[in-house]
Amino acid sequence: MSKSMSDFINCFIASEDDLLCNGTQYHLADHKAKPEDALFWIYLCIYALLVLGAGLMSGLTIGLLSLDLLSLKVLCDSGTGETKRFAQRLFPIIKRHHWLLVTLLLGNAACVEAMPLFLDRVSDPVTAVLVSVTAVLFFGEVIPQALCTRYGLMIGYYCSPIVYACMAVMSPIAFPIAKLLDCILGTDHETVFKREELKSLVTIIRGALELTSVTAGDACTPIEKVFMLSDQLTLDSSTRQRIMQSAHSRVPVYHGENHGDIRGHLLVKMLLLFESPASPSVQELMTNRKCFREMPFVKSSAQLYDLLRIFRQGKS
């Protein structure tokens, strides 16, 4: 008994996702890998590596390109220990500014664009979008950039082999673009100071260097010229006006009429808590820990660095 032609099914591949059988077009459903499949974990590992790669490129973009060539030169010449070694390793990389920029941006873009291709194989579109946005935001942008902003020199040093490898691999694309940017924007990326800016910078540096030789006795104001308040006064309008005119954030308080018997100091900004009609006495304010602090005493031979350390503790 012969079979008719209707017993046979003729199928043709119309496209990558479509199949044509006996004139009817069928769409091939995407196969999602499941946790019991080996491909599921392979795709997941590749996705995790892409997230880490995107984060590394994003962080290095901020960390390395924020380093100034002039500062690196100073560290290379006069730095000490690890700082000098870090700067010497990174200086040749930072010097190729546009090549480094294009390489890091290309690497970041490639990782970010490839991430959905692998995540889509193991999850539905909604889950893929939520996971991708969260992963890119925190692990691809926020955390890497925060770390590289704080430890850019050290992270750049340890990641320099990866950077060199990426620059070599992407050189067919990155190098021509970098050369084009060099022709258009120039190759000089060093910080240039104006005359007044340089003058202010030198003044700041000189003041910082003098902190090692200047003592508290050299920098202090003579007690007869210090604006102080007696603990017998009341905080009336005239006293408030005197405090405002003094333009000090802290006002010493002495006992009675003895200017040498200093009990502590008032925090001027905390006096704003009291309404204008109220006129509390200074003695009342001395019982309020928010308004009154004990005066730290130091020897006249103490260096200003030691005083700065005390001020930074927030106890004064």
Image (spheres, helix red, strand yellow):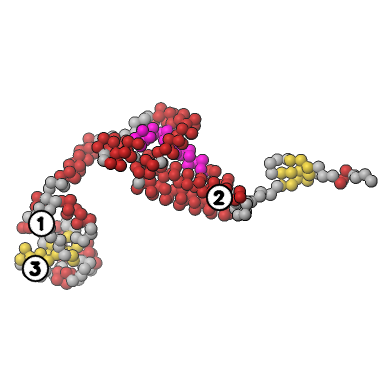
Q: Which mark is residue 44?
A: 2
Name the residue rendered at 31%, 38% in the picture.
85
Q: Position of residue 222 (x, y in %)?
A: 7, 55
Task: Say what secondary structure mark 2 lies in.
Answer: helix
Q: Is residue 191 visible?
A: no
Residue 83 in magenta stretch:
no
Q: Quadrant of the C terminus?
A: bottom left
* Kind of residue at disc 1: Lys
Secondary structure, magenta segment, majority class: helix
Which quarter of the figure has residue 71?
Answer: top left
Q: Amino acid at mark 3?
A: His
> Of residues 42 and 48, which is closer to you in this image?
42
Callout 3: 10 Å neighbours few (<14), some, many (20+)?
some
Residue type (three-letter) at the residue carrying disc 2: Leu
| 10 Å crowding of disc 2: few (<14), some (14-19), many (20+) | some
**Stretch in magenta:** 90-112
**Residue linked to disc 3:** 255
Which residue was labeled with disc 1? 299
Between 198 and 150, the one lying in front of the other is 150
**188 vs 254: above or below:** above
Horizontal arrangement in the rendering, residue 38 relative to residue 169 (left or right)? right
